[in-house]
Amino acid sequence: SCSMATIASAPVYASHHVLQITPASTNPRVTEMGISTLFRMIGRDDVQGEVAAERIATLHAGKKTAVLYFRGSYSEGLAATAIAGLNRRGIQPIKIIKAAASASSYVDNIEALIDAGVEVLYLVGGGLDSGVLLRQLRQLNTSINVISSDTLVSKVFIEAAGAAGEDIPFTFPPEAAELSTSKPAVEAIKKMGLEPAGYTLLAYAATQSWIEGVRRANSFDADLVAAALRKAPVETILGPVSFDQKGDIHTSYPAFSWYRWKDGKRVALAH
């Protein structure tokens, strides 16, 4: 469920003829490695970064913008895409910071942002690191507007950030639990005492896709199932989905929407 782990392990699984479908790994490299038996149920960071750049350019035009990301293929790739998107819109970040992951303090990074007069920050990293940084950012009484990405969907983020994590806009695929096609799955998961939160329904749809691929191919062979998945759209709880030659998903709705945490719940942003 993590881009860095997927990129590292995918060639190993492929060499053993294991079909792979990730519900959460958004780094473009995942499907750019040329592995025919690798698919994803989520959009790519080159799309997610563009969505973030567009929001900053539209809602924060003329503001001093910075990008802070943590070490790792997910963060580095998404940050690079967002920076390129900002540049195309005539926005040059006044500060770009590569922070250490799993640090106990980010005060030095935050002070660098404050000293530079940053007004808008695009934050990219794991849920825990982002939560810690945001909590410390607010403890220093800064008014920097923070915008972030899909990892903020994790409960780990809001637990680490506390009140500081409230109302931070972040991108995530459209809410699958609200689709009419997902109702049976949502009810079944809730009957188990679980919540269909985060990447859960994307993983459910990944399982549905695999089952349909096996049915079409009449085989568990990874190559045959992969070829069968590409032949025609698959009916899932996300609605009909299709996969291109690289293994990227295509749906009838946009890959990413905007959300925020409010009173411990993830809610959609109107714009």
Image: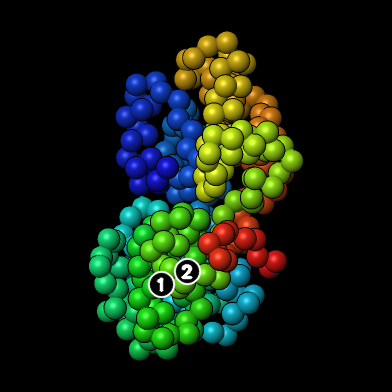
**Mark earlier in primary sequence (1, 2):** 1
Q: Are marks 1 and 2 in contact (CB under 8 Å)?
A: yes
State the residue at coordinates (54%, 29%). Answer: 207
Q: Residue furthest right?
A: 180
Q: In the displayed structure, does residue 82 sit left or right of residue 233?
A: left
Q: Is residue 131 above or below residue 176?
A: below
Q: How is the image coloured?
A: rainbow
| Residue type, label 2 | Gly
Could you tell me which quadrant the C terminus lies in?
Answer: bottom right
Q: Secondary structure at mark 2?
A: helix
Q: Where, quadrant-wise, is the N terminus in this rendering?
A: top left
Place of residue 186 in the rendered image (x, y in percent of width and height, measured from the top left): 63, 39
Residue at the spot of label 1: 134
Q: How far apart are labels 1 and 2 at the CA level?
A: 7 Å
On screen, residue 162 versus residue 271, left or right, reads left
Q: Residue at x 32, y 29 (%)?
A: 12
Seen in the picture, residue 263 relative to 1 is either above or below; the reply is: below
Q: Is residue 126 visible?
A: yes
Q: Is residue 243 visible?
A: no
Residue position for label 2:
165
In the rendering, at what x and y percent does residue 90 appear? 56, 77
> Relative to 141, does residue 24 appear above or below in the rendering?
above
Q: Does 210 appear above or below 26? A: above
The amino acid at mark 1 is: Leu
